[in-house]
Amino acid sequence: MGDKPLIELREVWKVYRMGKVEVPALRGVDLALGAGEFLAVMGPSGSGKSTLMHLMGCLDLPTRGQVLFEGADTSRMRGTQLAEIRAHKVGFVFQTFNLIHTLTALENVELPMIFRGVARRARRARAEELLRQVGLGERMGHRPHELSGGEQQRVAIARALANDPKIILCDEPTGNLDSEAGAKIMELLRRLNEEGRTVVLVTHNPDMASYAKRRVHLRDGRLVEVKAETEAPV
């Protein structure tokens, strides 16, 4: 891990307004994430896990406090700067896969590179390589409805890697999968981490969280527990 955190939250509050009522989602959270970490953010539904992930990925800004990305305060950034971080430095993996059903697996993985302006031949070659890395070398031409849930999630992970991000943020990535498919996804994330990727996993499932090297717990918007490094399943 480097000396400077990749992402740092300092006394972060996030408050949503529901009519005249203010609903705090995060209450004074302090957290530092180093490059190369595998962090699991645990907690029950409504504890603030997804809100925390959205702030780390520059999908949202805090109500109070600071979120620093590579030492820069995201609240001082313009929309274009935040979009640049989201597009090039962060890969997102969600529970619902979010694949485009009219596109093949290969075309879904190519999509972020199209938005970045990568030349057709280069993006095709990278998409093919990424799908081979996630074990889908024989399924590139299949559309999402022709793939299992676990295969669709592997396509989503390959897509998240398309622009070579510094961090992968995963929000309940195994939530729609059976236990066997979920374990395969977690093994893939662990391998990516061992290869040097920074991974943040948001989950309520202790079995999935046990793959991470470090775990933090949220309850009612507060960071209530930080466990020391533990051995991942073998």
Image (cartoon, rainbow, N blue to C red):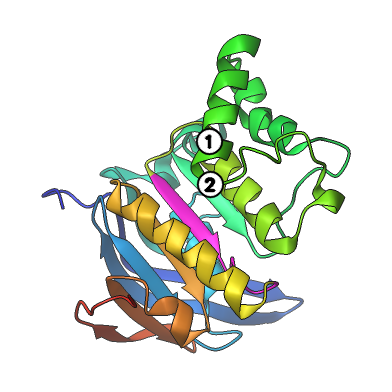
Callout 2 secondary element:
loop
Callout 1 secondary element:
helix
Q: Type of residue at label 1?
A: Leu
Which contiguous range is marked in magenta?
167-176
Q: Picture coordinates of residue 6 (x, y %)?
A: 28, 49
Residue at image position (23%, 55%) is 34
* Occupied quadrant, residue 39: bottom left
The numbered mark at residue 130 is: 1
One can see residue 78 in this view? yes
168 inside magenta stretch: yes
Label 2 close to label 1 by CB (< 8 Å): yes
* Occupied quadrant, residue 228: bottom left
Q: Picture coordinates of residue 116 (x, y %)?
A: 59, 21
Residue at image position (64%, 46%) is 155
The Cα–Cα distance between marks 2 and 1, rounded to whole angstroms, is 6 Å
The numbered mark at residue 134 is: 2
Q: Type of residue at label 2?
A: Val
Q: How many discs mark residues in the rendered view?
A: 2
Query: Is 164 left or right of 31, judged from the image as shown?
Result: right
Residue at image position (47%, 66%) is 186
Residue at image position (78%, 53%) is 147
One can see residue 119 in this view? no
Looking at the image, the residue that sits furthest to the left is 3
